[in-house]
Image: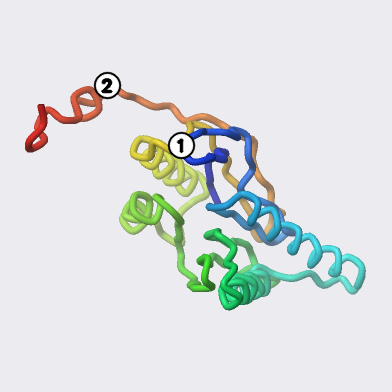
Amino acid sequence: MLAADTLGAYGSTKRYKSLERIVRVNARTLVGAGGEVSDFQYIVRLLDELTTDDYRTDDGIELGPKEIFSYLTRVMYNRRGKMDPLWNSLVVGGVEADGTPFLGTVGMIGTHYEDSHVATGFGAHLARPLFRERQSDAMSEADAEALLRDALRVCYYRDKQSINKFQIAKVAADAPAAVGEPFALETSWDYKAFAAPTKWAIGAW
């Protein structure tokens, strides 16, 4: 599963509020991104070219998530080597032909790793602690989605450059990749720390 909000911000301006930052590459692979919108659009065009080549070859074989992940690490590192990096952090998720799940992340200079859970931006600081505590490779789909929603809620509470509009994408061995419709989370702003954020802060008025 991949999750992201739908905000495209211009500095402090929440300019685009229905931006899809998770794309379906093929039936077995999803790619999500944070960072520069136009750079991500360029990456999507490159991925469309790969998908078109797969279709044109017509041999019944399509690239899996590992191949796409490897390709994107080379793209990001190549642009970094030209001193013209693509300002994105990418997440690649999917299922291999043999049913093995895959999840990895690629940074803007080509740094990359695979793990059972990954996150970019604020999520790397706020969501991953929740993942480390609650995530399990054997957890059910319902539990995984509940965990993602809790992580999104925490990030929304703590990041002023976010909006309460999210998408969750899923891919499984027995179900093709699909990006869900946007939704809003139930939130509560009556916590004491929210109502009086500086009450116990040192040096606050």
Residue 171 sits in quarter: bottom right
Q: Position of residue 71 (x, y in %)?
A: 66, 74
Q: Circle 1 is placed at which residue position?
A: 12
Look at label 2 and name its amino acid: Asp
Q: Distance of mark 1 from mark 2, alpha carbons?
A: 25 Å
| In the image: residue 83, left or right of residue 203 | right
- Which residue is pictured at 72% across the width and 58% down the height? 25
Give x and y (percent) for residue 127.
Answer: 37, 50
SS category of the residue bearing label 2: loop
Asked if residue 1 can be seen in this view, the reply is no
Tell which circle, 1 or 2, labels the residue nearer the N-terminal end: 1
| Tally of numbered tags | 2
* Residue 48 drawn at (x, y percent): 78, 60
Tell me: residue 51, above or below residue 146.
below
Task: Determine crowd level at label 1: few under 14, some 14-19, many 20+ residues with C-alpha closer than 10 A.
Answer: few
Task: Say which of 192 and 61 sits in front.
Answer: 192
Q: Is residue 141 left or right of residue 192?
A: right
Task: Using residue 164 as the reference point, say whether residue 95 is left or right of it.
Answer: right
Q: Quadrant of the C terminus?
A: top left
